[in-house]
């Protein structure tokens, strides 16, 4: 019975306990539900504020870093598509949360004085940026840049994506007009269908879970706030560092400064180093916590590191966390280098390392390594992302410096080319001046002067089947002129391209004879040349010569710029030579036409018009000097019979031979002309009747000599009539008429010649 009472009282106690426990825990459940609602509201506010602050910070940083940019400003202001595309591509590649970036029409007055505007659209963030120059003094008023951001990726970076989901509609307000779904936190909690289960079974468990979950969330929130504070501080320091670097000369940003700032910015970084690429090796250029002088003696082959999977990922730009540095060094380095690092430099004290590669235009530039000496799990994923961001900013700075150096070099190069082209045009203008005397030496000297890197030179011109030296600068031309080169002996192919020859001595020894090599050595053109720029001269599609411009110091003296200048100079010289050649042809044709207008085309003697002009000058001289002059009129006897019998070809041959004999019988200053078919007139200045009679006899004698034409012996004779100035007449017409009458008298009398006054 007692046992039964005890059993009943125990049951009653249990029932009462369960009832009060259920009532009490029901009230507790309601109370903690109220607390949970407040906590969730606070969480929503905290998440929204964290998200807003982070987005505002990132957008502000983007605006200052990418859109206060003189390159993008210039591209939009002057509508340079390729430049704006390159800058926007660099911005998008550096920020994975940006889905799309484009140039849009924008009214700056709607946004200004703010440099950007953030708004939500269909579950995405749309940020419209104004574009300023580096000094923020000017902006593009009618155009801007619109970036579309995936807020879910931003939540992922903040570690909120597991509890917060962005929705396009039917969600709760979040930030910037976005709406979110907190259903993941509420699943299974706010369900009336589970009330009995919650009261009978789950009240206590729910109370405990709620209590511990509440504590856990508070801890998480505090940790998030601490982490956010640290990250914000680090990002602020990073932003200040890169902003100051952008405002100053990027070339002054050294490896040591970058390393010191990285150790300062990245939490838990206590030391580090930077390996910079030199050729195909990585060399220590900055250290913090290690002796730099000793480390600089070590060189790491890039090819060997790329062959190791452990190192290849780092070289490709992926951040790597290394907790076993000793093993990595054993795998990637030579045994001697590895021992030197461990023993002399005490690398064994490194517990954890974080490495990232820094590239410029897709090429490895350096590797940044941060070390911790206390914990093996020192660096979190957030710190890895922060280091990746830091490396991206350094890469952007170096890329900008590279573009600035390239732009500066191109500007200087354009200035040099402009000056050279101005001098070249002035020189070509002088060459084309009709009063300028053409000289190959002057052209070669100007080529050596204009082409950068040229110290000496020579000019080869084609003469028949060989090339000869026609000018030299810095060499003995007299000895070079004795060297002739065939096309096979040249140091290059017979092609119209400009060639750079760096093994001239070796080519000469393989192609030239010993005698030619000795002459080249004596002239100073053998054994001293490190590089030769061979520039062909092309006229009417044919290579007529070469400019050889030599450098005695640097095998790499002639690059693309020098080749371009030399090619342009050669083209201009070819134009000048072509013009001179055409002018010479025209001058030759002019002389030929003038000659034909004054000479008989068959005998090349003066014609009647030219005879009158020349004879008039002789008579004027005789009149002025009061000396006699003699006019001889010659007619060929028997010429008609030969012409009729053998044809005009035979007659023409006789006339050509007679003309040659007459020229040989006369003095150089005597005037001889053909005035008819077989008639010639001669004017002789000075002398007397006897000397002229001797000349007439000599002429008649030379004409009578037989000649052979196609196996036939032909012969003719001459009759001459002579009139004397001023004895017979004082005008050319009268003298010719009277000499003609005297010739007929000599023909009737069978005499060789006759004077009119006899």
Image: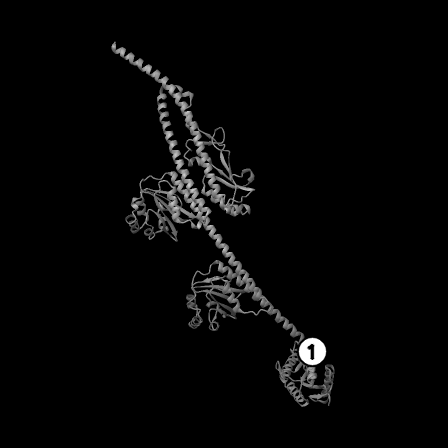
Residue 655 visible? The answer is yes
Quarter containing the N terminus: top left
Name the spot of residue 219 as percent of width and height, x first: 37, 31
| Foreground residue among 646 and 394 | 394
Figure check: 34 above or below 417: above
Asked if residue 124 is positioned above or below residue 571 in the image, the reply reads: above
Q: Is residue 621 left or right of residue 564?
A: right
Compare residues 211 and 100 and report the one nearer the observer. Answer: 211
The quadrant the C terminus occupies is bottom right
Q: Which residue is mark 1?
A: 613
Outermost residue toward the left? Answer: 2
Asked if residue 606 lies left or right of residue 185, the reply is: right
Relative to 98, 335 lies left or right: left
Q: Position of residue 353 (x, y in %)?
A: 34, 43
Residue 627 position in % (x across, y down): 69, 86
Q: Position of residue 519 (x, y in %)?
A: 44, 72
Kind of element beneath mark 1: helix
């Amino acid at each position: 019975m007692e046992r039964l009472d005890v059993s009943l009282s125990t049951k009653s106690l249990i029932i009462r306990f369960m009832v009060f426990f259920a009532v009490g825990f029901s009230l507790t459940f309601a109370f903690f539900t109220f607390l949970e609602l407040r906590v969730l509201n606070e969480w929503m506010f905290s998440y929204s504020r964290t998200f807003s602050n982070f987005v505002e910070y990132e957008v502000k940083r983007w605006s200052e870093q990418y859109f206060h940019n003189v390159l993008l400003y210039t591209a939009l202001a002057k509508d340079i598509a390729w430049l704006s595309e390159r800058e926007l591509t660099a911005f998008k590649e550096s920020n994975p949360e940006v889905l799309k970036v484009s140039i849009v029409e924008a009214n700056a007055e709607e946004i200004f004085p703010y440099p950007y505007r953030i708004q939500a659209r269909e579950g995405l963030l749309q940020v419209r940026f104004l574009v300023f120059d580096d000094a923020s003094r000017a902006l593009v008023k009618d155009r801007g840049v619109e970036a579309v951001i995936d807020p879910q990726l931003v939540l992922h970076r903040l570690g909120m994506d597991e509890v917060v989901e962005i929705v396009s509609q039917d969600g709760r307000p979040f930030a910037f007009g976005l709406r979110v779904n907190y259903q993941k936190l509420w699943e299974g909690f706010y369900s009336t269908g589970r009330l009995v289960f919650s009261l009978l079974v789950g009240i206590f468990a729910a109370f405990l879970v709620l209590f511990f979950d509440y504590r856990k969330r508070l801890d998480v929130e505090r940790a998030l706030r601490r982490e956010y504070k640290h990250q914000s501080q680090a990002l602020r320091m990073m932003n200040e560092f890169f902003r100051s670097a952008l405002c100053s000369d990027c070339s002054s940003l050294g490896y040591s400064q970058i390393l010191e700032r990285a150790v300062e910015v990245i939490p838990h970084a206590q030391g580090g180093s930077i390996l910079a690429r030199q050729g195909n090796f990585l060399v220590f250029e900055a250290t913090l916590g290690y002796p730099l002088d000793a480390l600089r003696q070590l060189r790491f082959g890039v090819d060997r590191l790329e062959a190791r999977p452990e190192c290849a990922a780092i070289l490709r730009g992926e951040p790597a966390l290394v907790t076993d540095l000793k093993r990595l060094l054993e795998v990637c380095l030579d045994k001697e280098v590895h021992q030197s690092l461990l023993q002399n430099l005490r690398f064994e004290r490194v517990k954890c390392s974080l490495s990232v590669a820094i590239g410029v235009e897709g090429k490895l530039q350096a590797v940044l390594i941060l070390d911790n000496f206390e914990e093996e799990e020192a660096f979190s994923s957030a710190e890895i992302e922060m280091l990746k961001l830091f490396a991206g900013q350094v890469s952007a700075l170096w890329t900008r410096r590279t573009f600035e150096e390239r732009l500066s070099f191109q500007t200087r190069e354009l200035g040099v080319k402009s000056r050279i082209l101005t001098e070249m045009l002035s020189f070509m203008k002088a060459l084309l001046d009709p009063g300028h005397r053409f000289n190959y030496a002057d052209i070669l000297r100007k080529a050596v002067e204009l082409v950068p890197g040229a110290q000496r030179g020579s000019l080869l011109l084609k003469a028949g089947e060989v090339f000869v030296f026609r000018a030299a600068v810095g060499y003995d031309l007299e000895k070079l002129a004795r060297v002739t080169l065939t096309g096979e002996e040249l140091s290059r192919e017979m092609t119209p391209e400009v060639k750079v020859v760096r093994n001239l001595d070796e080519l000469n020894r393989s192609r030239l004879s010993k005698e030619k090599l000795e002459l080249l050595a004596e002239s100073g053109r053998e054994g001293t040349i490190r590089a030769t720029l061979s520039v062909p001269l092309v006229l009417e599609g044919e290579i007529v010569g070469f400019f050889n411009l030599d450098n005695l110091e640097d095998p790499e003296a002639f690059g693309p710029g020098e080749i371009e200048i030399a090619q342009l100079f050669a083209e201009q010289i070819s134009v000048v030579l072509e013009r001179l050649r055409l002018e010479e042809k025209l001058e030759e044709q002019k002389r030929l036409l003038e000659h034909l207008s004054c000479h008989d085309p068959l005998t090349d003697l003066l014609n009647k018009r030219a005879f009158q002009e020349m004879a008039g000058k002789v008579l004027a001289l005789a009149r002025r000097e009061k000396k006699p002059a003699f006019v001889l009129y010659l007619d060929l006897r028997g010429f008609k019979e030969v012409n009729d019998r053998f044809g005009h070809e035979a007659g023409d041959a006789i006339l050509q031979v007679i003309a040659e004999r007459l020229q040989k019988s006369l003095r150089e200053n005597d005037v001889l002309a053909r005035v008819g078919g077989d008639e010639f007139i001669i004017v002789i200045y000075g002398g007397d009747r006897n000397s002229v009679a001797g000349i007439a006899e000599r002429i008649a004698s030379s004409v009578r000599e037989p000649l052979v034409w196609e196996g036939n012996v032909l012969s003719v004779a001459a009759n001459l009539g002579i009139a004397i100035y001023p004895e017979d007449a004082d005008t050319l017409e009268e003298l010719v008429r009277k000499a003609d009458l005297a010739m007929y008298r000599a023909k009737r009398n069978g005499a060789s010649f006759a004077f009119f006054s006899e």
